[in-house]
Amino acid sequence: MNRSSLDRRRFLRNVAVGGGVAAALGGLSPRGLSPRAHAAIPKPKWQEAINRGLDWLSSKQSSRGQWNTTVYPTAMAALAGTALIASGSTTTQGPYARQIARAADFLISKSRSNGLIGDPQTDSRYTYGHGFSMLFLSQVLGEEGLLDRREELVDVLSRAVEFSGNAQTAAGGWGYVSAKEGNDFDEGSTTITQVQGLRGCRNAGIPVSSEVIEKAKEYIYRCKNPDGGISYSSRQTGSSRPAITAAALAALYNAGDYDSEHVPEMLAYSKESLHDIGQAGQSFGHWHYTYLYYSQVVYRQGDELWFPFRDRLYDRISAEQQADGSWEGQIHPVYVTACNLTMLQIDRGFLPIYQR
């Protein structure tokens, strides 16, 4: 890591831990900040929500590194671990270092000889866990200081990348299980988890086939409808899904596609469907999944669009927090809490996969 990266990380840690932008700038009062810098200052209630959420999430982890949920155990561990990394902790430093290290060790233990991270015997949709695990472990690898765990991570992720390539469908997407086991069925949400996981691995130095990524991009383009939205599956085109469109756009950004002919139409569709955040947005379902990805999309657009959107998003999330620090919603409180915490911390810059 070069000096500029270290300086950036030190600045961001001051923002996260020391009370905001003013503290990071050496105690300069808000009155002395430019309008743009003043807009960047987080509200105290957001930080309070983050602290309470992180404490709740870390308290629910078992001593073996997993979160004892009955659904998607591998995916839950990866998502929860990612939310903890977003706070600035690593496997060796920070208040949640122990929990992150345990989560990494748990997911490493779920790696199978064929490269799959997960257990097909207990998880009927194991590609979710596999993709989220690649994403989490690749973020761990970038900051891992222990040589033995680093070597283990490289091995696990190298085989995981190979598994994803072998599990890709002929159309270029992924389904809930591998193409062979799923009769070559594909759908958008699992495809996005693979693309982001693969991109995280590539960013961390793990070789990833460019052919696999190009096929995935073509799959997304093939699923695009005339209104700019993305269909559920290449086999079921014609009906656009706001959630999958936002996720697909975030995945394209991860894959380095910012300005193809398809991206502006997808962005316009997403902004029209999702940007206002109003209660009507509940009608499309999976709100937290949707905004986990749409927040990434908006953040990549720059501060002028991000700050006002962030304020609305963070105000809503913090207002919906439960008394114990968790959030309720679809799937499981661990899932919803992990999604919300990742959104609340996305602009801190501790997760390389989400950086501008």
Image: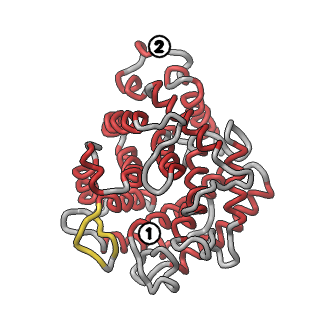
Identify the image quadrant of residue 72: bottom right
Q: Is residue 173 left or right of residue 309?
A: right
Residue 203 visible (yes or no): no
- Given residues 254 and 323, the one toward you in this image is 323
Instruction: Give the number of the disc on residue 116.
Output: none
* SS of the residue under disc 1: helix
Residue 192 in the image: x percent, y percent?
44, 64
Amino acid type indicated by mark 2: Ser
Specify few, some or many for label 2: CA neighbours under 10 Å numbering under 14, 14-19, or 20 or more. Answer: few
- Given residues 55 and 109, the one toward you in this image is 55
How is this picture coloured? Answer: secondary structure
Residue at x 59% of width, y 40% of height: 56
Residue at x 47% of width, y 24% of height: 44
Amino acid type indicated by mark 1: Thr
Residue 96 lies, with reference to residue 177, above or below; the image says: above
Give me the C-alpha separation between circle 2 and circle 1. 46 Å
* SS of the residue under disc 2: loop
Q: Is residue 255 left or right of residue 198?
A: left
| Residue for badge 1 | 191
Specify few, some or many for label 1: CA neighbours under 10 Å numbering under 14, 14-19, or 20 or more. Answer: many
Q: Is residue 39 left or right of residue 13?
A: left
Residue 249 in the image: x percent, y percent?
36, 58
Residue, far right? 148
Residue 61 in the image: x percent, y percent?
66, 49
Residue at x 30% of width, y 74% of height: 222
Residue at x 29% of width, y 57% of height: 284
Instruction: Tell how many labels.
Output: 2
Mark 2 and mark 1 lie on one chain; the one further toward the N terminus is 2
| Residue for badge 2 | 29
